[in-house]
Image (cartoon, rainbow, N blue to C red):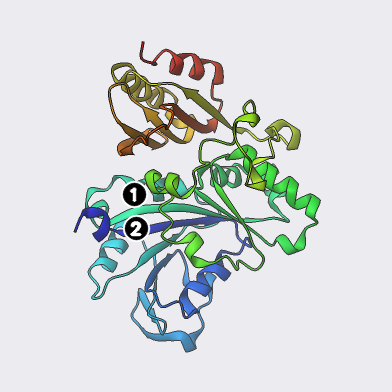
Amino acid sequence: MSDAQTQIPVTVLTGYLGAGKTTLLNRILSENHGKRYAVIVNEFGEIGIDNDLIVESDEEIYEMNNGCVCCTVRGDLIRVVEGLMRRPGRFDAIVVETTGLADPVPVAQTFFMDDDVRSKTRLDAVVALVDAKHLPLRLKDSREAEDQIAFADVVVLNKTDLVTPEELAKVEATIRAINPAAKIHRTARASVDLSEVLDRGAFDLSRALENDPHFLEAHDDHDHHDHDHDHHDHDHHAHASDIHDVTVQSVSLRGGEMDPKKFFPWIEKITQMEGPNILRLKGIIALKGDDERYVIQGVHMIIEGDHQRAWKDGEKHESRLVFIGRELDAERLKKSFDACQAA
């Protein structure tokens, strides 16, 4: 078996208190879904696990009667994950909940970086739960709320039953303005199908791209005529400034085939210089003389890329790159990206 098959997918779950994380986690721990999930939380108290569901527990790990386990992070996340890995029986997936205020980046980086953890797990998706009613206020008073959205692969827009259709459209446009690449699910009472948030392969770009052919495509402001919009949610081209003062912005770049000798040093340099400002970057690159699509993605200064698959017959060899971050110099990014194109 290849690494990818033996690695357990990890979902990082973020979202403010009250956004519905507890409801979602309780569903994982109590529903009869036939899977074994390990849920890592900061505090059991916050979740309030129903004692009737607990089969056995020791100080740190509670086993539920649907086969799932729940454990707390006391100290080191890596230690907790290694502890889970030593338990008999395999888990289908691990869910790590970050507290309402926490920055999801260090958690994601743990799974991106630590070799030991990485050999056994792979980061599957960062999922942000957003409260449709309170998001506008959250964004006013907190940078974290914005970062959570900017960083997410999947956004679960919850409590949609508490807002009007106009409010909902506005909130969705705000989320799009912060993060044009995330997949958005509208829910009430966190009733999203678990398969939509767990084991999505959304962090694994090659799978994300196969699942969503529009990824990196339909969010441009200037090429409406190019694409049929079969997704209603690609039509909002609300600019951040129309909604409120979102400080996170995204820059979408598009070009032809790249010269690998120019492109790689360039992306390396950009991420080193702009790293703290870049929350996420994702792209598909056409490299000159290479018959495979190269997918690339990054978190702050950490970046990785891999060949995904061969270009299909008749597929246009073009490069697309999206940066999501703060204080990005769009003009400079565009010029320097263009300069990497193959002659």
Q: What residue sits 49% from the left and 32% below the top?
A: 322
Q: What residue sits 62% from the left and 60% below the top?
A: 19
Vertical placement of residue 256 versus 120, above or below: above
For this orientation, the residue located farthest to the bottom is 52
For this orientation, the residue located farthest to the left is 1
For this orientation, the residue located farthest to the front is 313
In the picture, the disc for residue 263 is none
**Residue located beneath label 1 in the image:** 110
Nearest to N terminus: mark 1 or mark 2? 2
Q: Secondary structure at mark 1?
A: helix
Q: Is residue 189 left or right of residue 335?
A: right
Q: CA distance from mark 1 to mark 2?
A: 8 Å
Q: Secondary structure at mark 2?
A: helix
Residue 259 x, y percent position in the rendering: 33, 18
Q: Is residue 226 left or right of residue 6?
A: right
Q: What residue sits 44% from the left and 44% below the top?
A: 209
**Based on the displayed image, in which of its 4 quarters is residue 293 positioned?**
top left
